[in-house]
Image: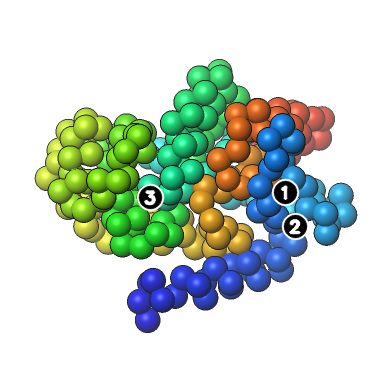
Amino acid sequence: MSSSSRKPLLICAGVALASVAFGVVSWQATAPGDTPAKPSSASAPEADAGTSELLKLARRESGDKLAVGRADAPVVLIEYSDFKCGYCGKFARDTEPELMKKYVEDGTLRIEWRNFPIFGADSEAAAKAAWAAGQQDRFAAFHAAAYAEGSKEKGFGEARLVELAGQAGVPDLERFKKDMAGEAAAEALRKDQEEGYRIGVSSTPSFLVGGRPIAGAQPLDAFESAIAEAKARAEAPGAAKR
């Protein structure tokens, strides 16, 4: 069975598993100006337990090539995204730089990206290329180049991906091409996809901010509210330290 034919089944299975394992994941979009939506079907203790489980998805690996910010930052934002997704691009251009400036630079926030391609072969190729750029410490620059205004309209064929790697300053393009086509890139992509499916992600961009879900490229203030709430939880007396 091809990977593309397995995806609908995996998404459904992921939702079911999420319901069993967490019981509280709700990927409803947060309305502008609201705090992240809390699932109405769960009691407060159940919601807290679910958040605790989702917090464990933060990898906090100091050598993670697809992350920025301190490994011990009080808040981790996990982003599931696709390079062909227009709203992912909007978030990358309009909101993410502000979060970097305001929260990553002062040590409050860590951002961990998960490649979650849902728009076919080009999306998967771009995800592998981003991972390959990361092996030479140029993931963030590749991410910015691939999400630049008008970039996705040019497609993500191999020549275009090599061009983007050049724009991102990847020093060894021959290594980049080998890494992009290698099994390690495919395995890294599978790991990210399986994590997303397991918790019920079915659209991009989707986020976990301190273990709480936000769906869609919401306005900056929605993320600011979520980060403030997550920081307060993390710094509360008796909060579990990671």
Asked if marks 2 and 1 touch (Cβ < 8 Å), the reply is: yes
Residue type at numbered disc 2 = Val
Residue tagged by mark 2?
24
Q: Residue at x 57, y 58 (%)?
A: 201
Mark 2 or 3, closer to the camera: 3
Q: CA distance from mark 2 to mark 3?
A: 29 Å
Q: Amino acid at mark 1?
A: Thr
Label annotation for residue 30: none
Is residue 70 rendered to the left or right of residue 127?
right
User: Residue 88 in the image: x percent, y percent?
Assistant: 46, 43
Quadrant location of the C terminus in the rendered image: top right
Residue type indicated by callout 3: Lys
| Helix, strand or loop under label 2 | loop
For label 3, the SS is loop
Residue depicted at x 58% and y 45%: 216
List the residue tagged with mark 1. Answer: 51
193 or 82, nearer to the observer: 82
The N terminus, quarter of image: bottom left
Is there CB contact under 8 Å for labels 1 and 3? no
Image position of 35 with respect to 97: above or below: below
User: Residue placed at 21% from the left, 32% from the top?
Assistant: 167
230 and 73: which one is in front?
230
Residue 62: tell me if it is visible: no
For label 1, the crowd category at 10 Å Cα-Cα, with few meaning under 14, some 14 to 19 and many 20 or more, is many
Taking the image as shown, residue 142 lies to the left or right of residue 173, namely right
Eye-nearest disc, 1 or 3: 3
Which label lies toward us, 2 or 1? 2
- The earlier-in-sequence mark between 2 and 3 is 2
Asked if 98 appears above or below 146 in the picture, the reply is above
| Residue with the mark numbered 3 | 84
